[in-house]
Amino acid sequence: MIATRWALWAAGAAMIAWGLWTAWVRVPPDQWVSVLLWLAGGIVVHDAVLAPVAILLGLVMLPRVPETWRPALRGGLLALGVLALLGVGVFMGAEGRRNPSVVPQDPLAAVLVAVAVVVVGVVIGGLVTTRRRARAVGTA
């Protein structure tokens, strides 16, 4: 267990180092203020919007669904939150694009397809978990 933890820590540290190096090499110096403001905005949005919404959903919605569906629903809600964050960038990038190869497809269709994939994944996960739990109870 300790070796796994150290391996994950080392992999995470390597990814952070790679991201910092890539930012240092590729972001022009005159855009550093914009990048730092964007990163600070992400922290503010997380603390002011995403965390309270996640807590509220956990307190209000999860107790009302069957226990076997909770893991799939938690994963799906997390994926939808990530999609919402990434969708903002996709929509903003497509809005005033001068180069259509930046966002070559219709951004609304792309986000809706991604949401549909997440919903199907949640349904499949919930059904599989429910079926496994029923088998485990039936054999006990």
Image (cartoon, grey):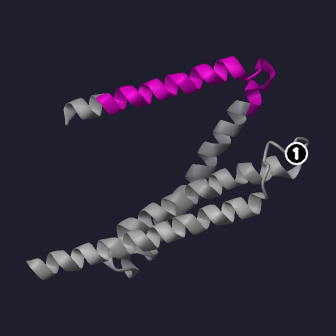
**Residue 81: within the magenta?**
no
Q: Nearer the viewer, residue 85 or 117?
A: 117
Q: Amino acid at mark 1?
A: Arg
Where is mark 1, residue-wise?
A: 97
Which SS does the magenta portion mostly show?
A: helix
> Residue 138 appears at what percent x and percent y?
14, 82
Relative to 46, does residue 60 appear above or below in the rendering? below
Mark 1 is surrounded, within 10 Å at the Cα level, by few (under 14), some (14 to 19) or many (20 or more) other residues, namely: few
For the point 30% across and 77% down, the residue is 130
Relative to 63, does residue 113 appear above or below in the rendering? above
The span picked out in magenta is 7-34
Q: Nearer the viewer, residue 3 or 140?
A: 140
The quadrant holding residue 111 is bottom right
> Residue 60 appears at what percent x and percent y?
45, 75
Pick the quarter of the image with the N terminus: top left
> Residue 70 appears at what percent x and percent y?
37, 70
The quadrant holding residue 35 is top right
For the point 64% across and 53% down, the residue is 85
Relative to 99, does residue 51 appear above or below in the rendering? below
Q: Is residue 119 left or right of residue 105?
A: left
Residue 59 shows in the view: no
Q: Is residue 100 left or right of residue 128?
A: right
For the residue labelled by badge 1, is the local secondary structure a helix, a strand or a loop?
A: loop
Residue 123 shows in the view: yes
For the point 43% across and 26% down, the residue is 13
For the point 65% across and 38% down, the residue is 40
Q: Nearer the viewer, residue 54 or 9?
A: 9
Tag count: 1
Pick the quarter of the image with the C terminus: bottom left
